[in-house]
Amino acid sequence: MIFSPAVRATIGLGFTQIVGWGTTFLMPSVLGRHIGDALGLPSEIVFGGITVMFAVGAIFAPRVGRLIDRTGARTLMAAGSVLYALSLAALALSQGMTTYLLCWAGLGVASTLALSTPASVALAQVTGPGARRAIALLAIIGGFASTVFWPLSGALDLAVGWRGTLLAYAAIHLFACAPVHLMVLPRRPPVHHATGATTAASSGVPPEVHSRAFLLLTLTLASGAFVFTGAMVHMIEILRGLGHAPASAVLLASMIGPAQVTVRIFELLFGHRYSIMRSAVFGSAMLTLGLGLALLAGGDFVAALTCIAAYGIANGLKAVQRATLPLALFGRGQFGTYMGRLALPQGIVSAIAPPTIAAVLSLYGAMGALWMLLAAATVSLLAMVLLARLARTVR
């Protein structure tokens, strides 16, 4: 069976994104305790590797975005896979805190080259006018990273230990992901000629309001990233702080995934029928309403389930809109540049959110953490509403 370049790119990048998230952000959830025991590191340092990864990635993101606009993503993403392999292999051989955190810094550079932002830009370059649907499909596929890699990490850990697991993951990046990037992406970004039907949709906001639109987009995405990253890492602890038993807290938190995937499928099937700006405002409103309900009645199981559903819907939509909103607002011409510039504040916020929420939890409990998250969500909603008013004509 012969697939079109767009289909090949979507499937191939879906595979590499699952591997990328599964072997980095999700990995310490399973291997972290054994890594900490072996290296004599407290859990704060073990999970601090994720903070280092986000922070380092944010620093390099703007430059990588500009490079992708000029050269395409093929070589950069393949190089990222090689760097993933080297960093994970080094992590498997690490002996203490310094080498451990340096390896996570390497993973941060690799993520900037091969994870999330470059994948969205590469897909937009390949699929052209069909980018919104392709990115939605990529988000659906990437949502299965925890489904695949949490049990896989557990099984490999039992079989070969955490060091052997990391060496196996390094091999996957080197011998599977790097070749996939080279095979499914073109050497140069293709040129898509706009038709009459797509010109209006791709024109975005007028040039004279680009700066204001970018500022509002940066504010809404960064404040939203604080909520999503901070809450995701500590969701079970927040639910337990609201009075739910450990088993109930785990069950409730596990419902985030189905909610995310469901709304992404809906976006894939029906997103062309409504404005992307309406979808973005709806997602931001759902996040604020969900957190507000958690503050009012989060100890009730049904209310908590409603909050989780709202959180999952908002997170599922934001995962798509982080890429599709810049595309709709500013077009494909400098898509990589805009994505790189947007990734900088999001990466910094994602790096500081988990330790900040952890500190608030320890000092003020679940209610204090929820108030902080609600404040950030409200800022995100207000910025999104102002952006939607500024971009009324964007579909």
Image: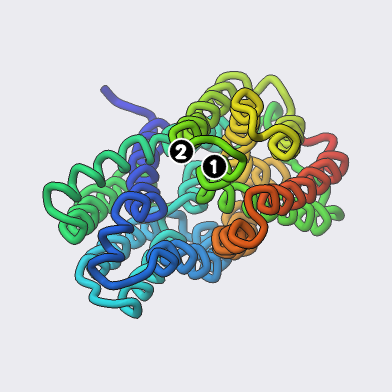
Q: Position of residue 190 (x, y in %)?
A: 48, 45
First in sequence: mark 2 vs mark 1: 1
**Which coloring applies here?**
rainbow
Judged left or right of residue 385, residue 168 is: left
Q: Is residue 378 above or below residue 197?
A: below
Taking depth in this image into account, of 382 and 48 the one nearest to the observer is 48
Q: Is residue 320 above or below residue 301?
A: below
Residue under the image location 52 percent in, 47 percent down: 237
Name the disc covering residue 96, or none: none
Q: Quadrant of the C terminus?
A: top right
Name the disc covering residue 246, or none: 2
Residue under the image location 18 percent in, 53 percent down: 168
**Label 1 belongs to which residue?**
240
Q: Is residue 168 above or below residue 190?
A: below
Q: Position of residue 300 (x, y in %)?
A: 64, 28
Residue under the image location 26 percent in, 22 percent down: 1
Judged left or right of residue 137, residue 314 is: right
Q: Position of residue 219 (x, y in %)?
A: 74, 55
